[in-house]
Image (cartoon, rainbow, N blue to C red):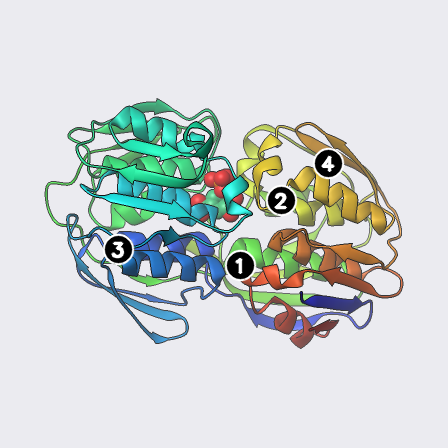
Amino acid sequence: MAQLRVRPGAPLRGRARIPGDKSISNRFLILAALAEGESRACGWLASEDTMATLRCMAMLGAEIERPEETEVIVWGHGLHSLREPNDVLYCESSGTTIRLLAGLLAGQPFTSVLTGSEQLRRRPMGRVTQPLRQMGATVLGRNGGNLPPLAIHGGKLSGIDYVLPIASAQVKSALLLAGLFADGPSVVREPAPARDHTERLLQAMGVSLTCEDSVISLSPPTSPLRPLILDVPGDFSSAAFLLGAALLVPGSEVILEGVGVNPTRTGLWDVLLAMGADLERLEERVSGGEPLADLRASTVEGMVGTIIAGALVPRMIDEFPLLAVLATQAEGETVVRDAAELRVKESDRVATVVEELRKMGAQIEPMTDGFIVTGRTPLRGNLVDAHGDHRLAMALTVAGLIAEGETVVEGAECISKSFPEFPELLADLGAEVEYR
Ligand code: S3P
């Protein structure tokens, strides 16, 4: 197991380029394989999750080449070009991979089996398998189809009109992918807007898809899908850890270049501004249908607590471990509600964030659907555990940057799931971190 050792020290200063967005990098591989012609992504994220998707798509017959670490070419042969895989599709620990592929495979006239790591095999799949069965796919899995491995025999699907019980981009995307292969239009109704990268990419490929007031309607394509040429924006969810570090470590100022600022992803930005953070967007632009900007963060004294609930939650669903750390340094209470989804992420993020931050002296109370942090509390270095959860590992590292003495994050190898360069980028900005 790898350890990340971190000590408080010099201010963080400088510019950094954030690796590509994980959600877009995953979706690119799946969608480009269905297009007709050559798709190309620059700035593609090479990480454990995206490599899992790449290997699964290759096993389904997709022609994929990686001329460079962060450049991917896919030669798409059309909507009906995939073939039956000759082995189990192994999704590692990637929830996006297994859930999006479940949707894709529901539309294929062959049988495939999806599985993954022990961590993934504990995560709920009923949210996708149940509506996919409703569309006509045969789906088997442990626990009545709720847990992987999942065996899927797809084929003739009917369109669906489905009210999502939870705001989930993975479920929404799985249904839109299946909807491409259905015999009529599909409608997906969201309780609150979750990330909309699938919708944007499908529109760029020429699919007839509309989004209005959280209602997404898609008609199965009648002509070939256009290939994608993408410059993948930097992942806001990765950038968030460096922004958070810069806000907390005295005397810091960092600029993160080319970060995606799709409004369905930047809930944390809005929350931090409300808490009094010193943040600025520079050079705002649009690339490949996604908004991006350079993001500046400087240290600020006197942040104040806030309340996060309702539609804000899906817009920052991956940022709660970091938010908890930032809240320890804000005056008063920060309350997170309506976030029961945190309990079914890579770890039970309510339980693990509370357990580990308490080891560092934080005042944090769990609730069934969130937590309450009371600040400001000085943090102290300690031996803490990542629980196999990349975002917890990175949040604890940020906490270590302002804690007294040394913090050792045990199990830090999970960071490779989404942001392998994190320790190196942090060190380049001036942090005292050591990864071994
Ligand atoms: C993702 C959606 C979110 C997010 C995950 C990536 C995606 O999951 O937490 O990191 O790429 O669609 P849910 O859809 O389960 O909220």
First along the sequence among labels 4 and 2: 4
In the picture provided, is 370 more to the left or to the right than 236?
Answer: right
Q: Is residue 370 above or below residue 11?
A: above
State which tag comes first along the sequence, 4 or 1.
4
Q: Nearer the viewer, mark 4 or mark 2?
A: 2
Q: Which residue is mark 2?
A: 347
Q: Earlier in the sequence, mark 1 or mark 3?
A: 3
Which residue carries the number 4 mark? 306
Residue named by callout 3: 86
For badge 1, the amino acid type reads Lys
Residue type at numbered disc 4: Thr
Nearer the observer, disc 1 or disc 3? Answer: 3
Q: In the figure, residue 53 lies in which quadrant? A: bottom left
Q: CA distance from mark 4 to mark 3?
A: 52 Å
What residue type is disc 2 on?
Ser
In the rendered view of the protein, which quadrant contains the C terminus? bottom right
Q: CA distance from mark 1 to mark 3?
A: 26 Å
* Label 2 secondary element: loop
Residue 171 screen position, x and y as percent: 40, 36
Left or right of residue 150, residue 12 in this image: right
Within-10-Å neighbours for mark 4: few <14, some 14–19, many 20+: some
